[in-house]
Image (spheres, rainbow, N blue to C red):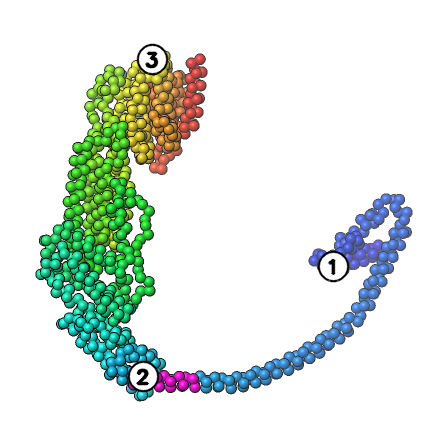
């Protein structure tokens, strides 16, 4: 019973002392301890076993018990001390809280006192500043009143003085006074409701009106419209009157300027009337000489009378230009049939020179701006077409200035077209003349080419650009610069159309028209002559004809590049609104066609020269060849033709390397398929014959790889694209021969090797291989049936049907297959 009670007590105690994991963790963090008794998972049995691990250790059990009792006694003392210390904690806390509340009340009282004092201070400051603001307002009103009274006094006195000076014509004093009165009157705009102020404003307006009428009358008296200028010259009174006019209504100044310029140019209208002999275009210089004298005379007599900002000299010149343009336009409409190209160009040249002179002398501020507006910095005295004019005399035969770096564009001439605009309706005469001149130029080029003949081989002319090409573009440049000085509108479009016409004519008459014609009589040669390879019987171009083709190709390339530059130049010269109408792409396509035709002729010539040799190859009895020797005669013939043609073509196309590369690629693309087709005609072929053909194929492959640099002292690596074409094509020819050399028994092995090595699923190609091997028809039928059975099933194409094409093997795969086939053949032969 005692044990049961103790067990229940222990369980109750454990239930009371059981803590949650969070509480236990917090206790361990606050009171860290390594004592096993403090652990939450304390096990009494394990603890006792730790104290007494063996029976011998039970000997000191009394000592252990005493230590535990001592520890219990100390723990009880600590608990007792802590419990006693907590008896007075509540009373001390209440006392501390009461003291804190008293301190807060005292602090609140002090804050309230400070707030009351701050409100009193703020009220005091407001009372002080209120008095200061009243003083500021009073000062401001007083200052405004004094200023207004001063202005009123100045205005009243100024109006009286202005009226008195106006009656006495004291314009010098009036000019300064009137400006001041007007400025003062602006301050009274908001007081116009006051009768006295309104009366003063009306008196000022009346004085201004009287001054305007009076000044115009003085100028009319000094410079009468119907008479000549007074001999006494300008007076100081009129000079001061101009200063007054600056302050008056702008219409007064405009009227003065208009009347003076009209009177100054009245003599010009009389001297150069429409019925006068000096009015025609051939004496147009006299018009410009007259105005130059008049401007010099004006500067001497009246230069100081008018204010500088009026720009009177420029205004006179501009009005002269307007009158001249109107008069010349009427005159040319009346006598349009008498206008010739030389006369028109002479008049335009003199007129543009005069406009350039105006640009150097004047800024052009009176053209678009209001009168009196003066530019801060004068424009540079340059002509925008000076660059083209200077280059016109120094244009090289190659027209190199078309592709020079562009110079900085000169400032626009503000006077350009101010007179010369009147010539634009008559520029059709110039365009028709250029059309005629270009037609004669093309005819002369054709005649010169026929007379001089094609470029001679072995000279610097061979393969060079034809001189007539440079002459044509030099003339184009001259016409373009000249026309751009005349007009940048529709005449430039008409001129570009003329350019297009004769670019096409040059391409067809000079270039395409002089390309050698291909011969068609080579097909009549006999088999015996082909085997003998007599060179004289092979129809091909002469060396002079090859040089001519290369020269035409180089010329077409030059024309193509220069035509593109010409289009850019035309777009620079023409108005921006017309730029889209300049398009020479059709002419550039024409020159591209000439280039393509020239390359095709060179390819056809070399290809045709090699045809007899390939025909001879297909006619040879390859079944009766007994031993493998050096390369066959047909290979020697092909190499000979290549060595004859290619160096000539390469040397003549040295300046157009990319087109020589195109020639090599096109020839290879034409020759290799033809060679493979002739290989299929070689049937039947013995093992030794196939070996001989394989040797010949390797020789041709070597010569084709060296084709771009053959016969050249400088060995240059062929382009990668060209090398890839040669390797791919000739490797196929080698593979065909390797398959022919392979035994056809067992059939399955032969067919599988064919499929792996040639990757050609076409039964016709397989049929040709069997013909080359010389198999009978019965054997071929069996092989073909086996070939169709052994073909791998290809993946379906996009349309769901089977696709019989194989991926082309790489050159490395081809070489590996050739080596495997060689080993197989050697093993079978042994």
Position of residue 107 in the picture relative to residue 814 (left or right): right
Observer-side mark, 2 or 1, equals 2
Position of residue 27 in the picture relative to residue 694 (left or right): right
Above or below 19: residue 183: below
How crowded pointer 1 is (Cα within 10 Å; few <14, some 14-19, many 20+) is rated as few
Residue 625's label in the rendered image is 3
Residue 30's label in the rendered image is 1
State yes or no: discs 1 and 3 in contact (Cβ < 8 Å).
no
Q: Which residues are magenta?
A: 141-161
Closer-to-camera residue (149/589): 149
Q: Name the quarter where the C terminus is drawn.
A: top left
Q: Is residue 152 magenta?
A: yes
Q: What's the residue at 48%, 86% (across, down)?
A: 134
Observer-side mark, 1 or 3, equals 3
Q: What's the residue at 37%, 19% (across, down)?
A: 695
Q: Secondary structure at mark 3?
A: loop
Q: Position of residue 298 (x, y in %)?
A: 22, 67
Of the image marks 2 and 1, the number of the one nearer the N terminus: 1
Q: Secondary structure at mark 2?
A: helix
- Spatial separation of the CA atoms under disc 1 and disc 3: 110 Å
**Farthest-out residue, bottom:** 195
Q: Position of residue 693 (x, y in %)?
A: 35, 18
Q: Is residue 112 magenta?
A: no
Total count of labels: 3
Of the image marks 3 and 2, the number of the one nearer the N terminus: 2
Q: Quadrant of residue 725?
A: top left
Q: Quadrant of residue 311?
A: bottom left
Residue 489 in sight = no
Circle 2 residue: 158
Closer-to-camera residue (633/369): 369
Of the image marks 1 and 3, the number of the one nearer the N terminus: 1
Q: Secondary structure at mark 1?
A: helix
């Amino acid at each position: 019973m005692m044990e049961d009670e103790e067990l229940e007590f222990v369980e109750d105690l454990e239930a009371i002392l059981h803590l949650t994991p969070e509480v236990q963790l917090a206790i361990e963090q606050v009171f860290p301890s390594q004592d096993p008794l403090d652990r939450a998972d304390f096990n009494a049995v394990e603890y006792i076993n730790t104290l007494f691990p063996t029976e011998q250790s039970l000997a000191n059990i009394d000592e252990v018990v005493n230590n535990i009792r001592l520890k219990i006694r100390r723990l009880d003392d600590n608990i007792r001390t802590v419990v006693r210390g907590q008896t007075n904690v509540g009373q001390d806390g209440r006392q501390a809280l009461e003291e804190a509340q008293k301190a807060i009340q005292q602090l609140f009282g002090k804050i309230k006192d400070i707030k009351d004092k701050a409100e009193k201070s703020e009220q005091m400051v407001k009372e002080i500043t209120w008095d200061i603001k009243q003083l500021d307002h009073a000062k401001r009103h007083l200052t405004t009143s004094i200023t207004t009274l001063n202005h009123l006094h100045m205005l009243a006195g100024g109006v009286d003085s202005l009226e008195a000076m106006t009656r006495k014509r004291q314009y010098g004093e009036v000019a300064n006074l009137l400006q001041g009165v007007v400025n003062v009157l602006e301050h009274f705009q908001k007081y116009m409701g006051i009768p006295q102020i309104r009366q003063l404003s009306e008196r000022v307006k009346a004085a201004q009106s009287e001054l305007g009428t009076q000044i115009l009358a003085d100028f009319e008296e000094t410079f009468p419209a119907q008479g000549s200028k007074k001999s006494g010259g300008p007076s100081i009174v009129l000079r001061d009157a101009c200063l007054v006019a600056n302050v008056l209504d702008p219409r007064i100044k405009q009227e003065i300027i208009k009347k003076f310029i009209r009177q100054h140019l009245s003599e010009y209208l009389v001297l150069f009337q429409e019925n006068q002999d000096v009015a025609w275009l051939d004496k147009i210089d006299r018009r410009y000489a007259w105005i130059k004298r008049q401007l010099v005379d004006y500067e001497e007599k009246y230069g100081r009378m008018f204010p500088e900002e009026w720009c009177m000299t420029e205004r006179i010149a501009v009005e002269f230009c307007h009158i001249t343009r109107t008069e010349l336009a009427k005159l040319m409409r009346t006598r349009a049939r008498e206008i010739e190209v030389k006369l028109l160009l002479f008049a335009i040249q003199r007129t543009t020179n005069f406009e350039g002179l105006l640009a150097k002398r004047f800024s052009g501020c009176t053209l678009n701006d209001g009168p009196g507006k003066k530019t801060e910095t004068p424009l540079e005295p340059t002509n925008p077409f000076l660059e083209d004019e200077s280059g016109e005399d120094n244009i090289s035969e190659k027209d190199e200035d078309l592709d020079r770096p562009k110079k900085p564009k000169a400032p626009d001439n503000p006077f350009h077209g101010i007179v010369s605009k009147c010539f634009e309706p008559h520029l059709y005469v110039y365009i028709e003349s250029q059309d005629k001149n270009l037609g004669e130029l093309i005819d002369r080029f054709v005649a010169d080419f026929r007379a001089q003949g094609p470029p001679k081989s072995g000279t610097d002319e061979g393969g060079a650009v034809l001189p007539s090409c440079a002459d044509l573009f030099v003339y184009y440049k001259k016409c373009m610069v000249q026309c751009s000085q005349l007009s940048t509108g529709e005449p430039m479009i008409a001129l570009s159309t003329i350019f297009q016409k004769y670019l096409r004519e040059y391409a067809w008459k000079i270039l395409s028209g002089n390309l050698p014609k291909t011969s068609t009589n080579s097909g009549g040669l006999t088999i015996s002559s082909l085997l003998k390879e007599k060179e004289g019987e092979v129809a091909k171009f002469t060396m002079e004809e090859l040089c001519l083709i290369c020269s035409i190709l180089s010329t077409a390339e030059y024309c193509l590049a220069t035509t593109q530059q010409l289009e850019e130049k035309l777009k620079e010269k023409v108005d921006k609104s017309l730029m889209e109408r300049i398009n020479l792409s059709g002419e550039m396509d024409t020159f591209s066609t000439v280039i393509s035709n020239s390359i095709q002729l060179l390819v056809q010539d070399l290809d045709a020269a090699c045809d007899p040799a390939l025909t001879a190859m297909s006619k040879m009895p390859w079944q009766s060849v007994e031993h493998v020797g050096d390369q066959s005669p047909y290979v020697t013939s092909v190499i000979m033709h290549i060595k004859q043609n290619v160096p000539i073509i390469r040397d003549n196309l040295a300046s157009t390397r990319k087109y020589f590369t195109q020639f090599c690629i096109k020839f290879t693309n034409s020759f290799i398929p033809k060679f493979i087709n002739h290989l299929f005609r070689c049937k039947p072929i013995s093992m030794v014959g196939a070996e001989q053909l394989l040797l010949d194929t390797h020789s041709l492959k070597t010569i084709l790889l060296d084709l771009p640099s053959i016969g050249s002292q400088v060995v240059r690596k062929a382009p990668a694209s060209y090398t890839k074409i040669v390797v791919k094509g000739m490797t196929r020819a080698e593979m065909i021969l390797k398959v022919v050399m392979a035994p056809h028994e067992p059939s399955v092995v032969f067919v599988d090797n064919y499929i792996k090595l040639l990757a050609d699923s076409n039964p016709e190609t397989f049929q040709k291989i069997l013909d080359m091997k010389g198999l009978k028809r019965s054997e071929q039928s069996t092989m073909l049936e086996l070939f169709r059975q052994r073909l791998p099933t290809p993946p379906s194409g996009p349309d769901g049907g089977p696709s019989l094409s194989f991926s082309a093997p790489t050159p490395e795969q081809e070489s590996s297959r050739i080596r495997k086939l060689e080993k197989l053949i050697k093993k079978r032969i042994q």
